[in-house]
Image: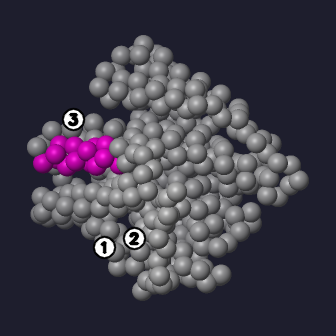
Amino acid sequence: MLHIQLPTSRPTSPHPILNLAFRIFFSAAGLFAVLTMLLWALVFMGKTDIDVTAINPLYWHGHEMLYGYTIAVIAGFLLTAVKTWTGVMMPYGYRLLGIFSCWAVARISWGLVGIGVSSANLWFALAAVGDLAFMVSMAWVIAKAVMAVKQYKQMGIISKLVLLTIGNGLCYWGIYSGDMSYVRVGIYLGLYIIIALVLTIGRRVVPFFIERGISATSTEQVKVKNSKVLDILSLVTFLVFMLADIFYPNKYLITISALSVALVNGIRLLGWYHHGIWRKPLLWSLYLAFVGMCSSFILFALQPWLHFSHSIALHALALSGVGMMTLAMMSRVSLGHTGRSIHQPSKAVSVMFVLMIGVFIFRVLMPLITMDYYIVWLMIAQTSWILCFALFCMTYIPMLSRARPDKLFG
């Protein structure tokens, strides 16, 4: 039997926001989501002096949405969840601040590149060092905890963190060498590895949240359906799609693999469904995130034949599998781990999710209907995103920066 040695004294940190990783990383992710979208609006309209010979502005945006915002959410989630999974204490206090500071240095440096501050090479180098130090230190503390308790089943998550580090490295190498094809591969690989991580972790937590969330407030004991066959098929079909879309864009292979991913996860969703989710925004948001991903893969399957922009399918996947999923996870995890009821979230939570649905509608669906007002649709989507995360910050940062009501450390 495994024995985990508990600390002899209660952990302490200089401020509650450094108690566990979810506090500081979720707070920073929310703020960064607002600031980077404001800056992206300026970059997109040509209102900054970004050096387009050094980096394509579209890739600047893609990099910071994935390796800035999304990685912050992943770090906050994993550096908190691994403590629960393994019983090993994760970094807190000044050690956590050190890991976070690496992420912050990289984000500030990329922001200065977006504004067009001189000495771009210096800022790129500083960003590369910060990002590398952040991702390696995050992967190391997670791997160390997993190996300490011999939970080898978690190695799949660690391998994805390694691939994300490689993807980020490709982006920097592409900028350094002046070959944007490396940046493209790095960004696409980053997005798809994150989606693979969502499919892996989502399979664990979404059914669990649905069962616990509905059963806790009713006399009915809910049990959803899962299948190991579907779990394997989901990742295998997605792997085929990922490799095809990045390296071998054969329209037949992309269509078949994308439809397969949509079908497998659609069957999953039918097994997870319970009418009670619609009474709980923290459940229907997670469910709709998976619905959005399934819809996205259908768009990928149709795109080679209907010839609409590949970017539309890409944004559909990013907004559902990353945008809505991370927003829903942060909203729930922040309540549970700060000692608050997950069954009584703030009314602002529903508004946040509706705004994110609005982003999907105006960034994905409206351009499919008509491109005549593309800039208008884009501006509405950007505004909805900013309002969504501004509301998240106002609702959650106060609780993330305060001690738990029950006085426990966490």
Instruction: Identify the secondary structure beneath mark 3.
Output: helix
Is there a contact, CB below 8 Å, between mark 3 and mark 2? no
Q: Is residue 407 magenta?
A: no
User: Which of the two marks, 1 or 3, is nearer to us in this view?
Assistant: 1
Is there a contact, CB below 8 Å, between mark 2 and mark 1? yes
Please state, as top left, top right, bottom left or bottom right, where the C terminus lies in the image. Answer: bottom right
Write down the region rendered in magenta.
161-176
Instruction: Please state which of residues 213 and 81 is positioned toward the viewer in this rendering.
Output: 81
Visible in this render: residue 236?
yes
Q: What residue is shown with label 2?
A: 91
Find residue 31 and report its image quarter: bottom left
Task: Identify the amino acid type marked 3.
Answer: Ser
Q: Earlier in the sequence, mark 1 or mark 3?
A: 1
Q: Is residue 171 magenta?
A: yes
Q: Answer left or right for 39 relative to 383.
A: left
Task: Identify the amino acid type marked 2.
Answer: Pro
